[in-house]
Amino acid sequence: MEGQDPGADKGWCAEPYCFVDPCNCDLDVPPTLANSYLPDASYQGKGLWYSYVTCGGKDYWMDAETKKQKQEATGVCEKKVDEKKWGKKSCRCVGYDGTPGTVNVTIDKKELKYPADTGATCESWDAKRHPDCAGDKPAGWCKQEWCYVDPCECDLDVPPKTSSYLPSGMVNGKPVYFSYATCGTSDS
């Protein structure tokens, strides 16, 4: 990282990396399961995988052959994705389920704390969190399930909408979008 001095034998500290979908990552050096970083986090039920190579960095952790054997041994890409949790096949949820902590979302020009994994799966994220969902008469949409999606990977009758919750957020280089339809609920 710029401005840092990782020291001798710690060159990995300066190498760029990102989280990736291991089943859509065709590189000579396969991604690595991040089970020591975020053991409870998951992307579409596959665990959380990262890659230095995707970002042009050098992976100091493991040789390519060992990684490939480990990935194949887990059978991660053969697992069936649960549409009820991860959205319809034609428009999967994006995000990391099980990520600890909170994220500030913007609602009516105010920042509120939501779980860090908000939008990672089909869930009624606003129930008991959004101001319009509090009190005796919550808005009708409060219990509707939704998740964040990549609009370029969605083929639904109802297109996803730009999310106002993360106004400067990005997914795959695009503004953050969400969808009720991928979770089987209507947009009302």
Image (cartoon, rainbow, N blue to C red):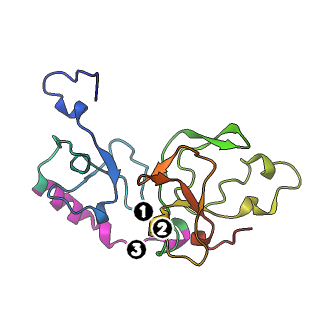
Question: At 55% from the left edge and 71% from the top edge, which residue is drawn?
Answer: 84
Q: Which residue is mark 3?
A: 80
Q: Earlier in the sequence, mark 3 or mark 1?
A: 1
- Residue 171 visible in the displayed image: yes
Q: CA distance from mark 3 to mark 2?
A: 13 Å
Secondary structure under the numbered disc 3 in the rendered image:
loop
For mark 1, does the 10 Å Cα neighbourhood hold few (<14), some (14 to 19), or many (20 or more) residues?
some
Q: Is 103 a magenta residue?
A: no
Marks 1 & 2, CB-CB < 8 Å contact = no
Secondary structure under the numbered disc 1 in the rendered image:
loop
Magenta span: 65-84
Which of labels 1 and 2 is toward the front?
2
The image shows residue 101, relative to residue 45, as above or below, that is above
Q: Is 73 a magenta residue?
A: yes
Quick one: 66 or 54, which is closer to the camera? 54
Question: At 27% from the left edge and 22% from the top edge, which residue is drawn?
Answer: 4
Residue 101 position in % (x across, y down): 53, 39
Q: Earlier in the sequence, mark 1 or mark 2?
A: 1
> Which labelled disc corresponds to residue 137?
none
Q: Which residue is mark 1?
A: 45
The image shows residue 28, relative to residue 157, as above or below, that is above
Would residue 3 be found to the left or right of residue 7 on screen? Answer: right
Question: At 10% from the left edge and 57% from the top edge, which residue is drawn?
Answer: 65
Residue 153 position in % (x across, y down): 44, 68
Q: Earlier in the sequence, mark 3 or mark 2?
A: 3
Residue 94 position in % (x across, y down): 47, 59
Q: Would you say the magenta stretch is mainly helix, strand or loop?
A: helix
